[in-house]
Image (spheres, grey):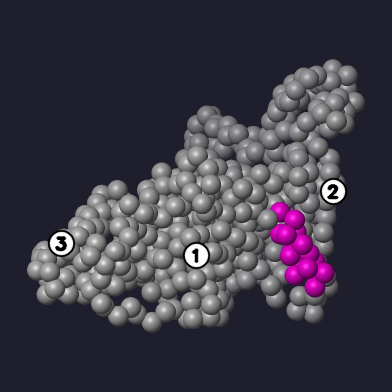
Amino acid sequence: MDDYVVSFTNAKDERVQVQGFQSAKGLLKTSNIKQEKDVIVVDSDESSDEVVVVKSPEPAIRLDETQARIAKLSFDHPLLVVAGAGSGKTATLCARVIEIIKSGVEAPRVLVITFTNKAADELKQRIFRYMQASGLIKVDDDKKSAVTSKSAMRQIPYASTFHSWCYGILMRFHTRLGFNRCPLVAATEAEHKKLMYLAKDQLEDCRRLVQCEYMLNIPPPPLPQDAQSGLEPSIYIHDTESRWNEVLLMAKKTTGFSIDWQKITEEEEKESVKKSKFTERAKAKIQHMSLTHALYQHLHSAIGQGRGLVDLDENQLDLGLAFPGKDTIQEMMFFMYRSKSKGYNPAQFPQIERSVLEAYNGTLRRFGLVDFDDLLDMANQLLDNAEVLQEIRNEFPYLLVDEFQDFNRLQTQLVLKLQVGVGRVTAVGDLKQSIFEFRGATCEENYHIFLEQFIDAQVEGRALGAMETLTTNYRSHKSIVDL
């Protein structure tokens, strides 16, 4: 292992049977084993006696027999590695990457996916060091440890999270999804919360719009197809601006209500483009809704009260019924996270839940934003296009995924689209270490799908894939392992 070695109660030399963990260098020192130091001697000048002693690259990956065998299994067949805690699964994955490159595959054509940015950075560092030790990479002498240097990045595999990789795909093909410019990413929970508050306010704005149309005898538009099939229609209305414009024109004729709506709308659009921060751009939308709210109050006072219509300001949606809890907005966010990570269609939910999802997604699009689950969903949509799929497959013929147990349905679908019918995929994970179920991780389902699609199914007439296990725990003390 590159980072840590065996638990010391298993060591043969009693002098190294100590508690805790040590690095490889520490173990060598404790056991009194001489550590060899390879050096490269370079004559600086033929006329000078001076020599420059340069430390050699770090040693190659240390693997046990099982890890080494798994690393060299056929790269053109599917492989599922079920690895326990501390069993060296990441080191084995990195070793497999090195073996693929040694076989003649260009490193940038190998796609390595993990779950977090930190893990992706660590993968890059490991692979970079191992490639240096194996003589597979050439970098400037002053940048031997700089994996982020441009020369290094061009020579190592593409190691990333799925979210980051999918954003790269979206940047290249966003026009295929109807975007004029690539959307920005709403990345923080604070931003998501602001979006949810806006979504909630927009639902009330939509309810007021429908009542204003009723008060002014404006015929409602045709029901959407799903509503015609018996499902409750969503409260959320995607194109409220044009309908509010019609309400304003009719209100002016009927009651004399007037406002320079066009000027406000133009200023709103300018602010939306000009401002880079979501909070600033949202102010224009809030101002617009305040104007429509004033219009509703005028019409309800002038017309609605005489007809006995309910005042919607005093009878707002009771979202607490659908999202019970102390913090309704937080519960709405939990619901949104779970639903989107599983790829659920909003139309499959009851009216309130569906309306919340559609309002949240509509608010994102209103400001040219996407969230993390949108990145996965949109990448899946793009890969449904045969031309895009073939281009990406040609670019990345080999796929290796770490922490497979924490993938959600959208991420697992990406693995399938990239590799079903190809089979050059390796997945590594541990059923017992799934920690992201609350964000849609589908651990057992992932393994079932992988076994069904890759291991138990032939790929292009070739032999079946393989499933291997890593069980030796190199991280924990024997007393912990035996619990």
Q: Residues within 10 Å of mark 3 (few under 14, many from 20)?
A: some
Q: Which residue is mark 3?
A: 264
Residue bounds of the magenta highlight: 443-457
Q: Nearer the viewer, residue 298 or 354?
A: 298
3 vs 2, front mark: 3
**Whole-percent x, y for residue 336 in the image:** 51, 55
Residue 231, x across and y down, in percent: 53, 74
In the visual, does 252 lie left or right of 87?
left
Q: Residue at x 25, y 71 (%)?
A: 215
Instruction: Tell me the kind of residue under disc 1.
Output: Gln
Q: Position of residue 426 (x, y in %)?
A: 71, 60
Residue in the image at 60% along x and 66% along y = 414
Mark 3 is on which residue type? Ile
Q: What is the x, y in percent for residue 143? A: 48, 42
Work out how far the residue at label 1 is from the one at label 2, CA to CA, in angstroms. 54 Å
Does any portion of residue 239 appear in the rendered image?
A: yes
Q: Which residue is tagged 1?
A: 351
Label 1: state its secondary structure: helix
Give the number of the disc on residue 316: none
For disc 2, the marked residue is 66
